[in-house]
Image (cartoon, grey):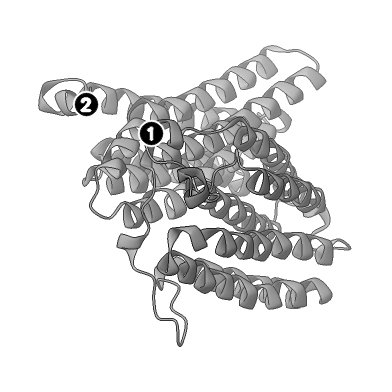
Amino acid sequence: MTETHKQGWLRAHGHTGSRVTFLELFFDLVFVFSISQLSHALFAHYTLLGAAEAALMMFAVWWVWIFTAWVTNWLDPERMPVRTMLIVLMLLGLVLSASIPEAFGEKGLLFASAYVLMQVGRSAFTTYAMRAAGRSATINFVRITTYLAVAGVFWISGGLLEHEARLICWVIALAIEYCGPALAFAVPGLGKSRTEEWDVSGAHMAERCALFVIICLGEAILVSGRTFSEMEFSTMTGAVFLIGFIGTVAMWWLYFRFGHGRAAHRIEHADTPGSLARQAFTYAHIPILAGIIVHAVAVEFMFEHPHETGNLAIAASVLGGSGLFLIGNLWFKGATSGRLPLSHLAGIVILLLSAFLAPFLQVYAMGVLAALVLIVVAAWEYKSLTRGPAAATLH
């Protein structure tokens, strides 16, 4: 029996086996559409209820993407069955993304059906594929499929209901899915999963999540560029365009200059890489994603209402986008370095204190303030980590 046959549809071990494939990059293109739809939905329905609905859909989009990233950490996209599975997921992902604007309207059942088919179908496929890895790995995915199937009942039920009932059902469904990893996917009769069984490639997970962050940052740039091109040029529109661009670049720097590479190295050498990956990637990236989406919405508000003063809702998006992004990076870097970066903590505190100035500052001025906070945090981190013993461990 050949080694390839023994391995089945699993990835090979080693550096070449952990690389991100072109098909995975192609798969991610669907989520460019998803992020765009989420930011537009939040901007169009910028109320407490609209924010809650957008947050729920963001959690769903992230969850289906990160679960697929975990699966392709073990399965080889170069194998035809795995490749076919990913292409089917892309098609369903397009349906899911197209349904986002009306997910709490006429397309609720379509959104829920696409989501459940992606989650349960992919997990059931992986359960079959993981037989080559042994009984323990197979049982792990039986547990995961069980959680997703139970949650699927609430997703479909919510799609059949309307208004508050739909929201409640979908919140329950998300709670079931998000509690799964924290509960080690405990299932009566099947026990719990053990984190030491989740042997992952840190380099692959880090690169996959980095590419998703790039997608989100790209959406923020697209929003800024598209809005700028549609407006009559003036000094103010030019200033807002620059503010949005600088803020996005600062986010890129904060995530990629030290966080991404260090996370890959740390997970590759961790005793329980699955536990660390769950903390650093599965959960900590949620506020990072949310921060970038809210930042994109804030840029649109800055273009439309640059001189407005005292609008606390808009202020929440301008300051909140940067704040959420820093919270996510604080969590991410804390999990992968063993210590919370003081620069990020300080930045979060400054943004919280800045909220007291919101009633007196124009929207564009708050945008300048938020961008400056990100720049200061990035400069502080760079200075502290490129001198002395810390630099030696990072380079």
Residue placed at 56% from the left, 64% from the top? 127
**Which residue is label 2 attached to?**
385
Q: Residue extending furthest front? A: 1
- Lower sequence index among marks 1 and 2: 1
Callout 2, which amino acid? Leu
| In contact (CB < 8 Å): disc 1 and disc 2 | no
x, y percent for residue 156: 76, 73
**Which residue is label 1 attached to?**
260
Q: Is residue 175 visible?
A: no
Callout 1, which amino acid? His
x, y percent for residue 254: 39, 30
| Nearer to the camera, 86 or 322 | 86
SS at circle 1: helix
**Real-space Cα separation, disc 1 to disc 2, in angstroms:** 14 Å
Q: Is residue 73 visible?
A: yes
| Nearer to the camera, 239 or 81 | 81
Residue placed at 37% from the left, 58% from the top? 198
Dividing the picture into quadrants, the one containing residue 258 is top left
